[in-house]
Image (cartoon, helix red, strand yellow):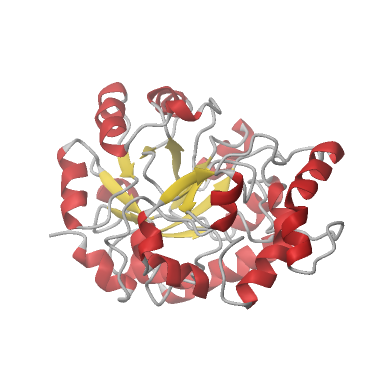
C-alpha cells in the first residue's frame, strides 16, 4: 500500500514534529497543502494539547499527525545536578545569576493515559512516537481509534523491533536529522548512520513502509529517497523559516547565517543526544558531556542562562535544533514549500 493511501494524504511528505519550534499553525498549513502536518506534544500540557488539536480540527479536514515522546521520566540525582551546576557556574557569574537558582526547563512529558484520554476525543488519523513506543496498553488504545501508528528507528535493529510491535510505518532517521535522536535500543552513538546508508538497509529488512528522514531538504533529495525505496519523506529543518513556524529570533538568525553549516550531536541542552547548530556552550564544554543530568533534566539549570542570553539576542545557551542540510530553509509559506518538494 502506498503511503498516501495508508495515511489518507495526497503527497508522500510528512512535516517533522518540532517541539518548541512550532504549533498547530504549521501542521494545518502542511496538511491543507496535501502533506501530513504534525503537532509535537512533548512540551504541551494536556490542556494545551486540547487547545492545539481543536485549532487543527477547526481549520482542516485533512489527516494530521500527533507526536509524543516515550521516555521514562528520570529520578533526580542530587550529586549529578550539583556537579552540573558547578560546571556551569562561570556562566552564571558572568551573567549575574545565582548558581543555586532553581528553574524548570521546558516540560518534556512522555505519552500517558491522561494524554490518551484527551486525544481520544480527536482520534487523529496518525499518531507517532519518538524513543520507541509506549506501553502495549496505550498502543492498543491508539489503534482502537483507527489511528495509524508511526515511530522512529535509527538502526536496522530498531526498525525490526518496531515492526514486531505492529507499527504501520517506520521513520528511518538518519544521523543528519536535526533535533533529538530517536534511538531507544542503545545509547551508543557509533550505531548512528546517515540516511542514505540506513534507508536501503531498513527497506530490505522490513515489510512495513519506510519513511526517510534526515538531511533531505528539497525535491531532489525527496526523489533520491523515493528511488531508494522510501514510501515517503519526513522533513523538519526545511520548515523552520516558514512564517507558520514559531522558531525563535536567535534560532532564525542562526539558520540564515554560516553558523548553520556546522551542527553537532549534543546532550547539553536536554541530557539526550540531539543535533543542533554549534554555539558557545557546545564549543566550550564539548557537544557531549557524559555527566550531564539525565533527559530531560539537563535543561533546568540552563533555563535562566538561556533566557538572559536570548533577551540580548544571543543564542549561546539555546538549543537551536537543525539538520546537516539547511539549504532548503526558505522564508516562504509552508504550503508553497510542501508542494515544491514534489516535482
Question: Residue shown at 22%/66% (left/top)?
Answer: 339
**In this rendering, does residue 64 appear at all?**
yes
**Total marks drawn?**
0
Q: Quadrant of residue 152?
A: top left
State the residue in front, 195 or 292.
292
Q: Position of residue 108 (x, y in %)?
A: 66, 52
Q: Position of residue 273 (x, y in %)?
A: 54, 41
Question: Residue shown at 70%/36% (left/top)?
Answer: 291
Q: Position of residue 238 (x, y in %)?
A: 33, 61
Farthest residue in the left direction?
343
State the residue in front, 289 or 174.
289
In the image, residue 41 sits, relative to residue 187, either above or below, namely: below
Q: Horizontally, is 147 left or right of 14 in the view?
A: right
State the residue in front, 168 or 250.
250
| Picture quarter with the N terminus | top left
State the residue in front, 118 or 311.
311
Q: Quadrant of residue 290?
A: top right
Q: Horizontally, is 296 left or right of 226 in the view?
A: right
**In this rendering, does residue 147 appear at all?**
no
| Picture quarter with the C terminus | bottom left
In the image, residue 182 sits, relative to residue 312, either above or below, namely: above
Question: Residue shown at 21%/50% (left/top)?
Answer: 222
Question: Residue shown at 25%/72% (left/top)?
Answer: 336
Q: Position of residue 57 (x, y in %)?
A: 48, 70
Amino acid at each position: 500500500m502506498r503511503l498516501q493511501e495508508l495515511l489518507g494524504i495526497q503527497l508522500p511528505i510528512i512535516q517533522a514534529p518540532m517541539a518548541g519550534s512550532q504549533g498547530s499553525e504549521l501542521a494545518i498549513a502542511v496538511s491543507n497543502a496535501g502533506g501530513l502536518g504534525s503537532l509535537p506534544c512533548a512540551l504541551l500540557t494536556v490542556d494545551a494539547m486540547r487547545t492545539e488539536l481543536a485549532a487543527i480540527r477547526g481549520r482542516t479536514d485533512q489527516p494530521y499527525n500527533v507526536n509524543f515522546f516515550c521516555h521514562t521520566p528520570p529520578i533526580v540525582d542530587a550529586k549529578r545536578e550539583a556537579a552540573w551546576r558547578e560546571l556551569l557556574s562561570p556562566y552564571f557569574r558572568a551573567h549575574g545569576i545565582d548558581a543555586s537558582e532553581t528553574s524548570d526547563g521546558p516540560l518534556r512529558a512522555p505519552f500517558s493515559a491522561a494524554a490518551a484520554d484527551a486525544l481520544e476525543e480527536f482520534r487523529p488519523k496518525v499518531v507517532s512516537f519518538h524513543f520507541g513506543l509506549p506501553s502495549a496498553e496505550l498502543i492498543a488504545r491508539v489503534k482502537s481509534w483507527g489511528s495509524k501508528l508511526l515511530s522512529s528507528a535509527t538502526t536496522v535493529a530498531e526498525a525490526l523491533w518496531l515492526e514486531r510491535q505492529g507499527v504501520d510505518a517506520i521513520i528511518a532517521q538518519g544521523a543528519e536529522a536535526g533535533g533529538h535522536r530517536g534511538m531507544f535500543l542503545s545509547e551508543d552513538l557509533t550505531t548512528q548512520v546517515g540516511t542514505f546508508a540506513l534507508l536501503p538497509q531498513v527497506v530490505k529488512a522490513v515489510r512495513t513502509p519506510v519513511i526517510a528522514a534526515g538531511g533531505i531538504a528539497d525535491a531532489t533529495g525527496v526523489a533520491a529517497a523515493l528511488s531508494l525505496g522510501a514510501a515517503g519523506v519526513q522533513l523538519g529543518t526545511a520548515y523552520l523559516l516558514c512564517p507558520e513556524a514559531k522558531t525563535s529570533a536567535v534560532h532564525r538568525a542562526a539558520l540564515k547565517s554560516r553558523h548553520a553549516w556546522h551542527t553537532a550531536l549534543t546532550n547539553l541542552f536536554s541530557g539526550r543526544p540531539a543535533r543542533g547548530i554549534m554555539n558557545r556552550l557546545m564549543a566550550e564544554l564539548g557537544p557531549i558531556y557524559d555527566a550531564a543530568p539525565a533527559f530531560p533534566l539537563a535543561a533546568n539549570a540552563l533555563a535562566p542562562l538561556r533566557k538572559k542570553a536570548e533577551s540580548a539576542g544571543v543564542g549561546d545557551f539555546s538549543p537551536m535544533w537543525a539538520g546537516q542540510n539547511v539549504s532548503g530553509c526558505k522564508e516562504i509559506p509552508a504550503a508553497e514549500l510542501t508542494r515544491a518538494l514534489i516535482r
